[in-house]
Image (cartoon, rainbow, N blue to C red):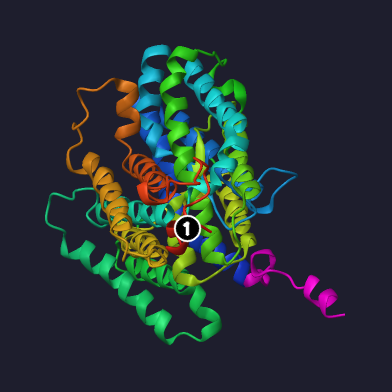
Amino acid sequence: MESTVQSNVVHPVDEIPPGGRLFGLGLQHLFIMYAGTIAVPYVIGSALGLSGAEIAQLVSANTIFAGLGTILTSVGLWKIGARLPIVLGPSANVIGALILIGKTYGLPALWGTCIMAGLAMTIFAPIVGRLRKFFPPIVMGTMLTLVGIMLIPIGVKLITDFKPNDPVTARNLIMGGGTVVAIALLMRFLPVNLRQMAILIGLILATIVAALLGQADLSHVWQGNLFGFSLPADFGHVSFNLGAAVSVIVLMAVLMFEVLPQLVAVGELVGKEATSRNVSGGVFADGLTSLVGGFFGAFPLVTFSQNIGVLGLTQTRSRYIATSAGVLLVLLGLFPPLGRLVAAIPGPIIGGIALVMFTSIGVVGIKILSNVDFGRPHNLFIVATSLGFGFIPTVAPNFYGSLPSNLQTILNSPVGVGVIAAIVLNLLFNYLPDAASRKGQSGSLDPIPEAAAARNVH
């Protein structure tokens, strides 16, 4: 009888919250990632000299497919999807490569590249899932710490109107700082059942105040098309140029190594282990959405790490909250006025929230690293060295400038190179037997006893 009752218990990840909370918590995820979603098509379209109407089509397509991909991966279909509360969005890492392809080979080759990148992800998804064993806490914690630190400048740039080298204006400082203060007070004094929506409520209040003071321009919300959707023929026929696409495919391979620990970390946060099947399904959903989206003007989509901070702060666990955010993204893409309303929120307000959210990702990484035994010197060396490699491209962007371009593509990704370093060093120190324990040890991937004692593997 007892086993029957236990078998009917629904895990919090699989629970569907009441409609109002589902909508509100989905909005929180939406606000954190929306700026990043629209920035990629805007930057690429502007660099390629597309018209305002064409850029609007790109924004619409990327928003819609980010939503569809989020729904697919959070709900799951057959073996597709991570079935965890994660959201998808266009990757900023491929902006430079896609602009170069578009200028050199034209838009048809650009869309062909996006399609081939998505196809490559779907093909390699099962392999990525089998790499789950290589991402124990010491690797995941290092990766998330790097992600959090690397994302902090985005929040700062939003607060400074993308002029980080200039002194911040009093107006921006008040909006950004005031938003953080409002959220802190709401999280402290709201009733317990409303605290999970403190970010959303604080953002709405800050935006209303900004609008009353004339700092939020809503006049353009109803200007332009009321309905928008891209068709495959809108940007010309697709052409496939493997030589041109190699750089983007390599970048997506690096991003797959970043997505894997993100999925594992989300599993840790929500109390449901991300198995190899979850990981493979998540990467497959990224690839399939990118593959289909390429025919409609969407760029390669990946799991958004920004939203891990929301999970950490709000302690929400239901994957259907991400589904709600996906539905909202689709609606924003289909009805541009809604997207323009969200885009009208002043940057400093979003920046204040983003600063807290992105830093929270780093804190989650530190929390995971607290499970590592730093009494063993080699564990300290692994984390320190990996973080050091990760910081190199941010401190010296041209550090690897003398190396081949394809190698630069990998090494110039702070998170990618940090994760690779952590994996290699963890294998070296925690899997390969040392001289004292080599007798009777094979070169298997099972951790040596000392490493298991250090709790570096699940």
| 389 left or right, relative to 29 | left
Task: Give the camera-side residue of 39 and 55.
Answer: 39
What is the tally of numbered marks visible in this picture?
Answer: 1
Q: Is residue 294 visible?
A: no
* The residue stretch that appears in magenta: 1-20
Residues 213 and 424: in front is 424
Q: Is residue 167 magenta?
A: no
Q: Say whether residue 435 is visible.
A: yes
Q: Is residue 226 above or below residue 211?
A: above
Foreground: 210 or 5? 5
Which one is nearer the viewer's eye here, 42 or 117?
A: 117
Q: Is residue 89 above or below residue 361?
A: above
Residue 176 appears at what percent x and percent y? Answer: 28, 65
The x, y position of residue 358, in whole percent, is 36, 59
- The image position of residue 133, as x and y in percent, is 54, 48
Residue drawn 30% across and 47% down? 386
State left or right for residue 392 relative to residue 230: left
User: Quarter holding the N terminus?
Assistant: bottom right
**Residue 362 locus on image (x, y percent):** 35, 60
Residue at the spot x=62%, y=47% of the render? 276
- Tell me what residue is drawn at x 32 percent, y 58 percent: 351
**Quadrant in the picture for residue 138:** bottom left
Q: Residue 6: say if magenta.
A: yes
Extreme residue toward the front, this view: 439
Residue at image mark 1 = 449
